[in-house]
Amino acid sequence: MAQEYANKQPQGFKNHVEKVAIVGGGGQVGKFIVEELLKIGKHKITALTREDSASKMPPGVEIKKVNYDDPLSLVEALKGQEVLIITMAVTAPKEQQTKLIEAAAAANVPWVLPNEFGGNPTEVEMQKDTFIGEAQRMALTLKIALLLYMMMATLALTPALGLKLVGQSPIFLA
């Protein structure tokens, strides 16, 4: 069935994204995402970093310095990207993620994978006491921007969590 679907696609069709921008690519979660994307070898990875960042990226990752107080800086850095992955620390300013999502919408980035640390971001009352930030504003921004929104389970980042998946069940590594 998959082959039949593939055969019906127009010339030049691809079933994966190639241009991936990441924020926090040198951090505790982001570095594992960058590492795995590089291993796959099908992606052009761009790391967005603060102008004063000393974060190091592995070879093969393009670095674009951005100014979070300048929306145009963010939009320009995101132009042509197919995915924006946001993996900022929970200590990052709350409005930074919203600025990134708005810039992604302005740059026509179709997929955004924002910071999510549990819970439904559209359930504003539930999120008030968490460190997620302005969940209501983010949800509204996503609706306005008509972006394709995906929540990513951190279980997919098994090396970062010290897990090894075998079959359908996890094995916890000491």
Image (tube, rainbow, N blue to C red):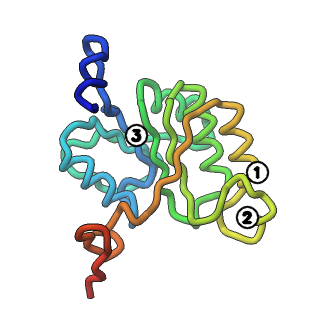
Disc 2: CA contacts within 10 A as few (<14), some (14-19) or many (>=20): some
Percent x, y for residue 43?
26, 37
Residue linked to disc 1: 136
Determine whether, in the image, residue 149 is placed left or right of residue 127.
Answer: left
**In front: 41, or 120?**
120
User: Residue 21's mark?
Assistant: 3
1 vs 3, front mark: 1
Q: Quadrant of the C terminus?
A: bottom left
On screen, 166 above or below 26?
below
Q: What whole-number distance in Å separates the C-alpha atoms at marks 1 and 3?
A: 24 Å
**Residue located at (31% from left, 75% from top):** 170
Give the secondary structure at mark 2.
helix
Residue plotted at (54% across, 56% down): 115
Q: Residue pushed farthest bottom?
A: 174
Q: Specify the label residue 109 is tagged with.
A: none
Mark with earlier residue (2, 3) = 3
Position of 108 with respect to 4 (left or right) is right
> What residue does disc 2 label?
127
Task: From this view, report whether residue 14 is shown above or below residue 40.
Answer: above
Give the amino acid at mark 2: Gln
Specify the amino acid type for callout 3.
Ala
